[in-house]
Amino acid sequence: MALSFPDLSGAALDDLVEKLTHYAISNGLVIYPPDFKVYQPSVAPVTLYPTPFPRAQFHKGVDISTRFNDLYSRVVVDKSWLKEVIADLSKYDRDFTGMLYKTYLEAEPKIVQPVSLGLFRSDYMLDTVSNSIKQVEFNTVSVSFGGLSPKVGQLHSFLNSQGLYGTPQYYQETDLPTSQSTDGLANGLFEAVKYYETSEKTASTIVLFVVQPGERNVFDQRAIEYSLFAKGVKSERVDFDKIISSVKVDSSHKLFYKEQEVAVVYYRSAYAPSEYNHPDSWKARLLLETTKAIKCPSLLVQLSGAKKVQQLLTDRAVLEKYGFADEELLSTFVQIYPLDASEQGQLAKKLAFEHPERFVLKPQREGGGNNVYKEDIPGFLRSLDEKEWGAYILMELIVPAVHDNKILRNGDVLNEGIVSELGVFGTLLFNETDGTILRNDYAGYLLRSKTSTSNEGGVAAGFGCVDSLYLHD
Ligand code: ADP
Ligand code: MG
């Protein structure tokens, strides 16, 4: 049985909020507000308390993490299948998926680095109907909050051990697992650097973080950089739209930034169409793809994270092809339908109009704010030509538990109930040509929560907050 939340109010709550705030600022659990000055971060939105989660379901997410990494490597190695899927999507979404794919096709004959790195995050909600984790999505590009997640766990543990939730301690420390995601992700980058340096017989290389201009979530990324530096690897940050003017490629296709050899290109950007407005954006992507540096992710790995691929993987036959059709993975899937001419597609078209309240409609986009929910689905579909519907997937809504946790955002305590999403990080270093897996590791967890009244949970987008786990049996 899970403990209910501590019941704090008045002076005790004010005291908790002040101590939480000081801890967060002292330890870098911060984010920039909109229109920030570089010296003015604010406390990242966080929950006051850790959120209950069934221990066995958390461990299940952890246990299957390396299998999901492996599965996505099989998808990428099965190039002809993936290319066919993406080529089809490109017809609907020429300007983005289509351009990523076109850029890949242009790069393909010139690829000199078959090894690529994935820093992945598989996201789940705990479904109240089956009391088991169900996958929301599998992220293959620019996964965030791995650098802040450990700090929230440490924060909650600190408040607990100080007796601020209740004396002497409200929770048992062993029920509050701290995520190791900062070091986990940094280790993924580190292993890629070591592989590169060994195979290229070089040393003192760097990781190039390719970032968004004016990034507000920069401290999340910095935490990974500092962890990497503690392992002896330096990193540099460059805006995606400054790539062309700031990098050099030598005659053996090695990449250099400020005269330093780049072992790994780590994208914390380049996943949304709005980031490609610079005249050289696609040229930059193509250039990096054809260098010796290991890409995190490569274009193909990024494309494998398409929601369409996730939908296709819910088909047992497809999973069987890759050798992953076991109950453990399958049990994490909810129904996801295509909206095409297939039998499943015909059924989905009917369901979308008859029972829209059971579904979310998703385009091939990342980063939040793109989905269409419930009753908005029929009107949205009607506004499109039916030929365009194939660009979307229709996904059954997961019904997560609502908890009485409170969110602290900009100094205000929000008390509307929350729902949570568990992210499980994994790192994968593999050869896209022959399928060899060089490293495959679990890399920590993230709990994001949002007020139960909002559909989406993006923290940076202002929908949600970072949280930590209180495990119970
Ligand atoms: P994005 O790539 O934009 O992050 P997601 O698929 O993660 O897209 O959806 C965004 C958010 O919408 C999720 O974080 C979750 O809060 C909500 N959501 C997505 N799919 C579902 C689902 N099947 N059931 C319930 N909520 C969902
Ligand atoms: Mg998401």
Image: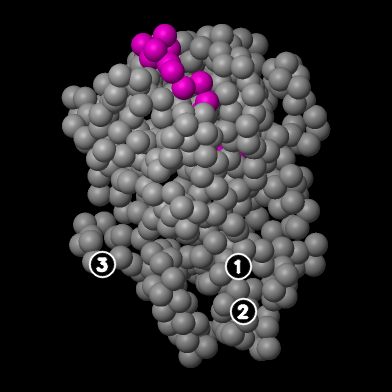
Mark 2 to mark 3 CA distance (whole Å): 28 Å
Mark 2 and mark 1 in contact? Answer it, CB < 8 Å.
yes
- The x and y percentages for residue 360 are 53, 35
Spatial separation of the CA atoms under disc 1 and disc 3: 27 Å
Q: In front: 79, or 398?
A: 79
Which residues fall within the magenta stretch?
106-122
Quadrant assignment, res 358:
top right
Residue contact at pointers 2 and 3, CB within 8 angstroms:
no
Indicate left or right for 140 with 213 as reference.
right
Q: Is residue 411 visible?
A: yes
Image quarter of residue 32: bottom left
Name which residue lies at 21% across and 57% down: 35
Coordinates of residue 367 in the picture (x, y in percent)? 42, 40
x and y percent of residue 345 in the render? Answer: 59, 16
In front: label 1 or label 3: 3
Left or right, residue 110 beside residue 59: left
Q: Is residue 449 magenta?
A: no
Choose between 341 and 30: the one closer to the eye. Answer: 30
Label 3: which secondary element? loop
Q: Nearer the viewer, mark 2 or mark 1?
A: 2
Disc 2 residue type?
A: Asn
The numbered mark at residue 195 is none
Q: Position of residue 378 (x, y in %)?
A: 47, 27
Which amino acid is tagged 3? Gln
The circle drawn on residue 50 is 1
Which residue sits at x=48%, y=90%?
11
- CA neighbours of label 2 inside 10 A, class few (<14), some (14 to 19), many (20+): many
Is tag 1's residue or tag 3's residue first in the polypeptide sequence? Answer: 3
Secondary-structure class at tag 1: loop
